[in-house]
Every structure is written in structure tokens, then in C-alpha cells.
Amino acid sequence: MPGIVSLIDKDLSEPYSVFTYRYFINNWPDLCYMTMQGDRCVGAIICKLDVHRCRRTNRGYIAMLAVEKELRGRRIGSKLVKLCLDRMQQLGADECVLETVPWLCDVEMTLWVGEVGALQWRSVGTSGRLSTGAKGKRHSRSNIKHRSMGFVKEKRLHKSLGAKYNSSYYLNGNDAFRLKFLFKLPDGFSLADTKHESSLHMIQGADAFVNCKTSQLVVQASQSEANRVCGSLNADIIIEISRFPKKGETLGARSEDTGVMVPGGKGANQAVAASRLSAGTPRKAQFICQFGNDSHAVKLEQVLADNKLDLSGCGRAQKPSGQAFIFLEADGSNSILIVGGSNVAWPAEVTDFERQIQGASAVLLQQEIPKYVNEAVAKVAHAAGVPVIQDVGGEEREFSDEHLRRLAYICPNETELERLTGMPTDSEAKVVAAARTLQKRGVKNVLCTLGSDGAVLVTAEGKVLRQASFPVPGGKVVDTTGAGDCFRAAFAVALVEGKPLQECMKFAAAAGALTVSKYGAVPSLPTRAEVTALVG
């Protein structure tokens, strides 16, 4: 992933977030290819194929294409494009589109992987000639037909800012054109209806790829990735109470059938939530934890397996399972007492994390496992270019500046943010000020949950995004246990799918609202379908 990002970002006027890359690669791995020279990525193409929301056609989309500068002009990019077009055709695509800079467009736009850029588009003027740029070569229209691969101009694109104002499509001030390649003729369409040469004429006419003369070309399909959650697993004992007993006082529980064990722990909650919320996508969820050696562990392991979690990275400690005694009051609020157990019995030397973290979409951490484990995972993930999302909940302990610099997101609630910064957080403005103080220590983004008041995200670019809480389905808060864990897991799932940050927060808020409408932590975690229905 770092090699692909570095290669593509070199020539972009507006670099993409790493989550955008992960969105495409994770969801359409068979439409993403790399060209390798030894262990170096020298070419890459990233595409997708889905149903157009208005026309209901199967539309392919070439999002990114790049070739190392010293290898351009050797048709590597052409080969990558042809591979993706062939694969799209196999998958039933009706058309393929992309956007690009106009470059003095006049009659039609033609794909040329040439001397000056990996994905470069040149104009065909009224003279019917194509300029390839740097070397000044010119080719006749008959030669263009042979090499264009069949893309034709469809429309010019703008970004509208209202009736009086328009902005250009790209941040650097350029507009864009959408180009289209047709695999099938639309209903009622005849070649006689247009002066443009149809891409149907071109499919069989593209040049065969000319092997790169200075490198061995290896094209590899990208592999699907997974969300990794490294954290705690508890046997939650939920006790419903009317009030806390006073010193020396004995009280009965509020319900006769309370005191049952249900799976929990911040790590397990987030892992199960990530798994349920990723259902129906190519992405899976993996949980890395330490099982205990008691009967609780057997039941807990079965629940995790039933939720389709990859448990191959888990260990087994010679201690009882971690436990959480949750005192649940009538209004749904809770107080929790944690017994660490196996959660604090990780090996002293953690040596296998590099293998576990490889290929992750993101890594989620919490504070219910040893500090050295979190730091070791964050170090490996950061070096591998894998985003780290740190939950602050759990044991009260400080973060080093070095650890904070390795985090893509830190996710406290307002109480935890106050403890971390020593600043008041009793208003949104104070939450934002505290978050900016934390950013000065190196963390990039601060996502603070505010309970029933929603959440605030202060981004690395200085933006402040707000998300109100969703109304609780059924109108009653039953149990708030696990709501924050579900919010963070849902945010991570949406983030690695490439959704805009505001949509990530909305998705997370909906997931959190569904969680508090049910009893227990893991039992209350919603499915993707439930969250999607609530978001609307």
C-alpha cells in the first residue's frame, strides 16, 4: 500500500487520503493491479465496478493510474488499462468512465500513456492529429484508432457552488472531462447516429502490450484486507440495581433474572461490531486477544466464532478470563468494575505483530490491555502505513508523544479528553480547544463522543465536524454498555470504505443509537442492514 500511494500521489494536484485507496482496493481487489520491478511498485491502476444509481447500468470507473517517470512511454499504463477493461467486460460491465483534465479538447479525447505522465490525455484537433507531448511525435487519425483504446469524450464537469458561483472541478483550478468506453451499445443507439468513432470499433484494435525493456513486468491483483482489533475480552456480569448501596448496606438487585454472563470487553465489542457492520463486503474482521483458561473462555470463543471473526492471532493465558461487573441503573446508565485476568497476561515479548498487521485496513486499540502491547502494535502498523485508531477508554494512563504521533485517530469521550489534557470540556468550544491541544502533541485527528449530544471531530486540517445523536429506536435507552465501542468500530468501518468523514460520523451515530436500545454489549451490537436502514 505505501508503494502504491507514493507512486500515484507524485503527479496528483490533490492527493487522496489513504482511506480512499483502501476503499477501492478492499471492495474491488480484482480491478486493482500493480506492475512490479523486483520489490518496487512501478505501475498501478485502481478501479471499481458498480451499478450507476440513475441509469442502472453496470459502470466501471478508472480512479487512478500511474507509472514511474523513467518507465513511461513503454506502454505499461496501456497494459494496465487493458487488463482492467478486460476484467470489467468479464464481470458484465456496460461502460467504463474516468475524469481527466481537458488539455485543449476539440473533437475527441484519446488515451495516451506517453512521455509526460502515467495517465495522460491529449486532444485531437480539427486537423485530426494527436500530439504526444515531450518528444513532438505526431500520429495520423488512423493510428489514433489503433491506439486510443476507444475512450470518447462524454461531458465537461464542474463543481457548482450555487447559482452565482462556480468552481473548477480540481483544486488546482482545472475543469475536467468525463471520458467513456462502451462495452455495449445503449438501447436504441446506432453507430450511424454519431460522428464519433465508437469504442466498440476499438476493443479488438488496441496494440498488444510491448514488454518493458528494462524491467521484468509482474502484474499482481491486490488482496482484500481486514479490520484488525487488538484488545480485551471480558465475561460481562450485568447486575441491574435501583441505586448503589451505602457503606455497610445490603441491597437486592432490581431484577430477579439479572447477573447473567454475556460477552464483552472493549476489544471484543469493537471486533464484533466491525464484523457485523462489514457483512456483505469483501472485508473481514480479525480479533487479536488473550483467552483465559476457564469455562468462560470456551463460551466467549464460541460467540466470537459465531460472529465470523478471524481468531487466528489470539493466544491463551494461564489465567481466568477478564471480567466486567456492570451495575446498570434504571435510566440505562452504568458503572463498571474491571478485573483484568487474561487481558493483562500478554507475553512479555510481543514478536508476531508484524505478520498479524500486514494487510490490515485499520487497527483499533483500547486501554484494557497492557500499554506495551498497544505501543508495539501501533509502531508496527504505523511503519506499514496502516491507520491506527486509539480508544482512550479502559485503564487511566497517559500516552507518550511518540505513541500519539503514530495514531491516525484518537477517540476519547469528553471526560477522558479532560483527563488527557487537563482542560475543561463542558462545552463544545472547550472540547475543540482541548482537542487542538492534544493535536499539538502529534496526534492527527481527535474524535470526541459527547453521549446524547453526539460527537465532534477535529481533523488534522483543522476542520471541526459535528454529528448529532440519532433518536433511540423505541424511544427508550435500555443499556449504554458498548455504545461508545460500537460508535468507534462503525466509524472505522465507514472510514476504510472511503466514505466522507461526515458520513462516517453519521453511520457511527446511527450504530450507537441502535446499541443503547438493547440489553448487553455484544448482544446489542447492530447489523449493517439495521444501521443502513436507520441512516436512511
Image (cartoon, helix red, strand yellow):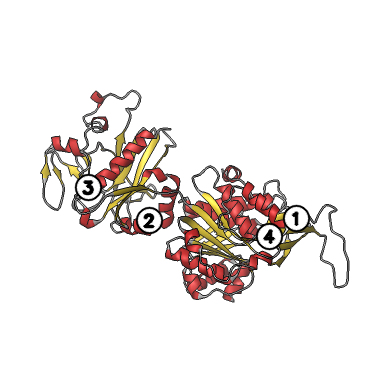
From the top left corner, tell me how far across and down residue 27 is, in percent.
Answer: 45, 46
For label 1, the SS is strand
Q: Residues within 10 Å of mark 1 (few under 14, many from 20)?
A: some
Q: Is residue 172 left or right of residue 417?
A: left
Q: Which mark is residue 16?
A: 2
Foreground: disc 4 or disc 2: 4
Q: Is residue 352 left or right of residue 426?
A: left
| Distance between the alpha carbons at the discs numbered 3 and 1 | 62 Å
Residue 50 visible to an observer of this rendering: yes
Quarter location, residue 290: bottom right
| Distance between the alpha carbons at the discs numbered 3 and 2 | 21 Å
Q: Quadrant of the C terminus?
A: top right
- Residue named by callout 1: 261
| Distance between the alpha carbons at the discs numbered 4 and 3 | 56 Å
- Residue named by callout 4: 234
From the top left corner, tell me how far across and down residue 325 is, in percent.
Answer: 75, 62
- Residue named by callout 3: 113
